Image (tube, rainbow, N blue to C red):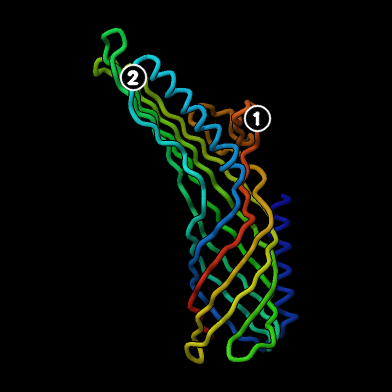
Amino acid sequence: MKSRELLAALIGILILSTAVLGADHRVSFSLRGGYYLPISSTYNDEYRAAVNANLSDLNSYLTELGLSGSLTELPKFKGTFIFGGEFELYGGQQFTLALGTEFLTKSFKSQLKASGDVDEVAWSVEQNGKARVSVLPILGTIRINLPVEVVRVYIGGGAGYYLGRVVIREDWTWTEEGIQAYSGNREIKATGKSFIPHANAGVDVAVSSHVFLTADLRYPFGKIKSFKIKSDSQDEAAAGQKLTFLDAGGTEKDFSWEMTGPSFQVSFKIKF
């Protein structure tokens, strides 16, 4: 209920702001694309470290048995491309109101392969892991035009309602003398949401009287603090519980996703 109230409040503020800006406004629409660099410290410093430590321990165990192969660890999250769209309402020379959305998704994969003979018995092991995060924010921003001629320069701020989704999947296969001896898989789906403020700045360069090239920087401050499990292929009772993991020190932690960081975007904007 709290999340619905926050979303309703955001929409209400946008509607009220539109009325304040005046009825004689123009509207523009832009398709946007860019690159986003959120901190994502929980994944990079805790979750990733724990998964890679477990893979390393398993690889060491298999090596001691006499198996050898390759290990691909979960990579760090360094950024991702984003795509979206935005409407902007013009209420005079100084203020505008922007309402938009965008989408980002990123997948991270790990793999362990090993094979060899143990007591003259041929063994092969393959273990694959994949984590995928997707985020869809609904964004509202009030912008103030600066007194700059030739190009439009603006600063502003607002907030976004961030809808996040995480899918974690593992599968493993152990084969003895070419016959599958042990295999399985597990998939966990979880969602999270959060209301996050942001600062904004940008510049519009006119291509024609109705078409503009825009460079935009948005910087959100916050994170999706937790995710709730929607389904777990190995544990139906887990639905509704928080998504957690054991860090490298064995402490249980909530899975979260930090959204703080710069988002650089460019777009073609068409005024109506």
Badge 2: residue crowd in 10 Å (few <14, some 14–19, many ≥20): many
Q: Mark 1 highlights which residue?
A: 252
Classify 175 as above or below 271.
above
Rendered location of residue 253, percent (x, y):
65, 34
Rendered location of residue 250, percent (x, y):
63, 26
Toward the viewer: 199 or 193?
A: 199
Amino acid type of the residue tagged 2 in the rendering: Leu
Q: How many marks?
A: 2
Question: Residue at left 65%, top 79%?
Answer: 154
Whichever of labels 1 and 2 marks the residue nearer the N terminus, that label is: 2
Residue 263 figure quarter: bottom right
Question: Residue at left 69%, top 88%?
Answer: 147
- Front disc: 1 or 2: 2
Left or right, 97 with respect to 103, comes to right
Question: Residue at left 49%, top 56%?
Answer: 80
Question: Residue at left 61%, top 42%?
Answer: 42
In this view, the residue farthest toward the left is 178
Task: Say which element carries label 2.
Answer: loop
Q: Mark 2 highlights which residue?
A: 67
Badge 1: residue crowd in 10 Å (few <14, some 14–19, many ≥20): few
Amino acid type of the residue tagged 1 in the rendering: Glu
**Disc 1/disc 2 C-alpha distance (Å):** 32 Å
Rendered location of residue 261, percent (x, y):
62, 58
Rendered location of residue 76, percent (x, y):
50, 45
Task: Say which element carries label 1.
Answer: strand
